[in-house]
Amino acid sequence: MTVSYKWLQQFIELTEDPEQVGKMLTSTGLEVEGIEQIEAIKGGLDGVVLGTVLTCERHPDADKLNLTTVDVGADQPLHIVCGAPNVAARQRVVVALVGATLYPVSADGSPAEPFTIKKAKIRGAASEGMICAEDEIGLGHSHAGIMVLTTDLPNGTPAARYFKLEPDYQIEIGLTPNRIDAASHWGVARDLHALTGRPLCMASVDDFNVDSTDFTLDVRVEAPEACPRYAGVIISGLTVRESPDWLKKRLKSIGLTPINNVVDITNFVLHDLGQPLHAFDADQIAGRGNGDAAYQPGQIIVKTLPEDTPFVTLDGVERKLKATDLMICNGNDDPATAGMCIAGVFGGKKSGVSEQTTRIFLESAHFGAASVRQTVQHHELRTDASFRFERGTDPNLPIYALKRAALLIQEVAGGKVTSDIIDIYPTPVADFRVPVRYRNIDRLIGINIEHDEIARILNALDIRQENITSPSEAGNDAGFVAVVPPFRVDVTREADIVEEILRIYGVDNVPLSPALRADSLSEFPTVYVNQLQGRLGEMLAGNGFFEIMSLSLTRPAYHEAIRSVLPGADVTLLNPLSDELSVMRQSLLFSTLEAMVYNLNRRQKDLKFFEFGKVYHQKETAEGTRKYVESMRMSLAMVGNQQAETWQQKSRPVAFHDLAMAVQRVLSSLRVRSFETQPTDSPLFQYGLTYVVNKKPMVSLGLVNPKLTKLADLKQPVFYADFDWQALMKQYSGKAKYEEVPRFPDVRRDLSLVLDKATSFDQISKLAHQTERKLLRNVQVFDVYEGENLGTGKKSYSVSFTLQDTTQTLNDEVIDKTMQRLMGTFERELGAVIRK
């Protein structure tokens, strides 16, 4: 949200510069993200000052030039050669100093080439500046002579101050959703008032007057829950034209484009006070005659229209309404012609203000946040008005804002108020009443704040105190009831009141105690999951992986492709942003594939990704109800080449074992070293493995099914691993076991085993460790051979066995006995033929 520094000064005196104001706002919770200077004219008249011509004489070598001395407030007057015919001594003039850059305009008003003032000699005479005409500094078109001023300002005064062209500053505030009360200059000024104690200045509306009641409207609200308050007034005899300079300047200062004087006033009041308004062409409201003599009261009905009713908005787009969309309608019975405006969101094409408009109905309402939010999400229409309504506006502001806007419209467009103010407010919104205890304020903030200071802060925030009790009266229950105005939609709990006190008191004013400590009602976890994720991420990054973070929303079509392996029903959004993002994901696979497609389309061919993310599904309970389940997963994915080509080695495509190695590094980092492997039967993979610990699957990995990669528009083969993060955390132990580095050497022995093709290396490894638990340290396969000479259905594994005793050096007798025992087991259990 953008506010103007000068505009804020209409509400509160600011002696601080914009940077200081930015720091003050940030300290109150309105974080300032940037401050940008706005020049009233190009260059801002920087280096241009007021001066007085002390002397003026003809140039001895040029009839049309004059030699002048000019006092510009410096130690010495400047010598300036001037060619203007009207220059004379004792004139107050505008002087451009040496180094100033001027941005002149041409006679037709178009910008001319800028130039910079330099010291020069003109016909032999020194010139140390320039006395300016209005076109030379961009303030007009005339070049008949220099500008001669009438002013008591001292010499050296910046010309921008004299012409009231000082720069303004755009202050960009990162407004959080809960602080909609600050979505206006008035709202921001309220925080500055609470912080500084300076008085607020709000424009008076005492001059508002109903000139006549010649025109009336029959206004009805048929959906009071979606429109708690609806107000309006008719202004007749106005002229729609270009806005005056002051109004255009105000709107431009916050980045808005002026449209016409009536619409600009509604936009001005919105950003001034935070109350959205809408102006209807009153002559377009059904039930009205063609002239005043034939006038018949029209109707405005706040209601919903049937599903799929067409409605053309101000941007010329025809939209199909939902049956829940709140509409401002006229008295027509035909729904297709009844709608005039989508309430709180966007106006209609036919009822909008145009150059031919002479009478308007000015609307000021309080629409329900839920109703507006639902409409905004369905139509994907986000406007300045809907931004405020869907978060909650002040129900007590519409009448003041209506009067303020009516007075301003009369000022810039003429006209008279020709109806009483219509105000339909059957059930006023009550203040929030929040019980607060002083001891909880002290406990949450960490220090004891004087009760008088608490009262001052709350009073400055328009929060009243009732039923105040002191510690002497009520002990630990001493406190008060905070009465919160309804425009503070975010302050409904005791903790919210404490937060309000703290943000104005100042977090920086809370000292840090030498014995600072924190209390917690929950037990500390045995495993710090975030720290573990961080360490694991660093390990993976060191091995060439990049972390991705993707949306939890996904396409329903993805789930349909893998429905058989999903743990439950989809979690579907009630108000999705689009049909493409209408369900919560049940797998990280497709968000990973989409990230790969995005990078591959940008010529990033070799990718290694990892992600920590949550997945969601619905589960049916024993009672027949549905329960939402949220679980944490981790994924690895690889595509392209394992490594780039170098002079030492050629590149090669990623293979299954590259991913398996990365998976085992993850398991090793989590101290999961004992696991079983089994082929995966998941349709996610064309082939792959599942690692199991205590009969619980920890991770499945393999080559992603080409049908699934095609669904994500990915043509390359992708290797993917899906970890059950929560199951891994149950296996992880923060305790480390340390062993002395062995003092005795290890011994390697190799065997060549001819086995059935169905026999896996995993079976060999498990059987070897079961047979020799004491001495066997490692089993590795270093060659696999298949050929006709081995026989049908046979293959040969070349396997190395590493033996080591931590207490003594192994001798040949022990080694041979161990190997004989291993060979006997392989022959007996696997039918192996030992090639010797």
Image: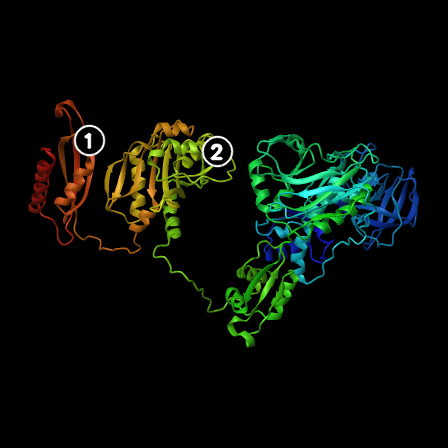
* Alpha carbon separation for disc pair 2 and 1: 47 Å
Q: Give residue 185's position: percent from left, percent from top.
A: 68, 51
Q: How crowded is mark 2: few (under 14 residues within 10 Å), some or many (20 or more)?
A: few
Nearest the camera: 248 or 374? Answer: 374
Name the residue at the top extreme: 788
Q: Give residue 542's position: percent from left, percent from top.
A: 37, 43
Disc 2, SS: helix
Q: Give residue 522's position: percent from left, percent from top.
A: 40, 60
In the picture provided, is 446 more to the left or to the right than 619? right
Disc 1, SS: strand
- What residue is shown at x 31% (from left), y 55% (from top)? 734
Nearest the camera: 26 or 456? Answer: 456
Q: Residues within 10 Å of mark 1 (few under 14, many from 20)?
A: some
Amino acid type, residue under disc 2 in the picture: Glu
Counting residues from the start of the chain, the first of labels 2 and 1 encountered is 2
Q: Does residue 251 appear in this view?
A: no
Instruction: Please name the residue that numbered disc 2 is placed on.
Output: 580
Instruction: Please name the residue that numbered disc 1 is placed on.
Output: 784
In the picture provided, is 608 more to the left or to the right than 580? left
